[in-house]
Amino acid sequence: MNPKKIFKIIGITLGILVLFLIASNFIQLNERESLLYKIQQYATYNEEDWKNYENNQKLIAENPQGTMQTDVAAPVTDFHPYDINMLTPSAKAEELKKIQNAHFEKLVTAKNKPSDDEAQAALIRLTQGRLTDVIIHQKLDIKIGKCYENPNTDGNFNCVSCMILLYNRDKKNWQEAPNGENFLSNSYDFYQPSEGDIWEAKDLSIMIPYDYELIKKYEKK
């Protein structure tokens, strides 16, 4: 190999190491974060990402010291996000344990996600048409929130995990479930079987944060 190229590679490597050393003195880390991930945050996070990150850190900090210490994380069976402010103290403590173990800071925001209409159509197919009656007679529409890349593609082209809500067109407000039978969850996986294919929906398979921004966007002003 050309000696100039060797010196160039060595110089670049040393430069990167120096940058990491400088960054380590100025970037604050907690015990769950690596320096490399923190640098990635600063490079890729937008304003909404930072709001979700800061909100999760605040929730964890508000929990009484010691209640989140676990030797072995219990297997998660319910991936759906919950509004921490609406839970009882004991349920809140359990949910905060799950949030800490889920490491939301490692989630990657999905750039490719279904629109409201695409998510609604996917859920109509998933519910075998039951959602259609709700949309027509109860005047409710599906609104989709922030989505995160999900590695559980199950052989599909891609998969994202998102929180959804029902928006009442008459009342100009969101609601948690349709009147009558509660057959909808607040979050789902959405996937495309192949590139450019229609979006389909399936049960949520990873934990994602509660989308407070989505709720705020569609609450009655």
Image: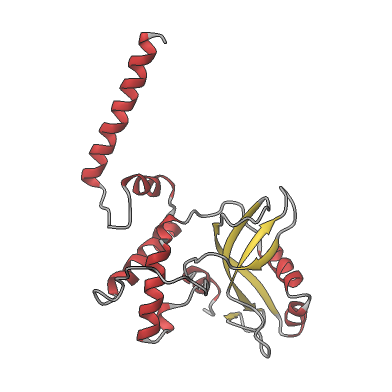
Quarter occupied by the N terminus: top left
On screen, residue 112 versus residue 196, left or right, reads left
Q: Quadrant of residue 187?
A: bottom right
Q: Considering only vertical position in the picture, is 144 above or below 63?
A: above
Name the residue at 49% across, 69% down. 211
Q: Quadrant of residue 172?
A: bottom right
Name the residue at 56% across, 57% down. 150
Q: Considering only vertical position in the picture, is 220 above or below 51?
A: below
Q: Residue furthest top?
A: 2
Name the colour scheme: secondary structure
Residue 206 lies, in percent from the top left, at 53, 64
Residue 160 lies, in percent from the top left, at 59, 58
Residue 45 lies, in percent from the top left, at 43, 51
Name the residue at 49% across, 53% down. 108
The one of 43 and 88 positioned closer to us in this rendering? 88
Q: Residue furthest front?
A: 72
Q: Residue furthest left?
A: 25
Residue 185 lies, in percent from the top left, at 60, 77
On screen, residue 174 versus residue 81, left or right, reads right
Name the residue at 40% across, 8% down. 2
Q: Considering only vertical position in the picture, is 89 above or below 153?
A: below
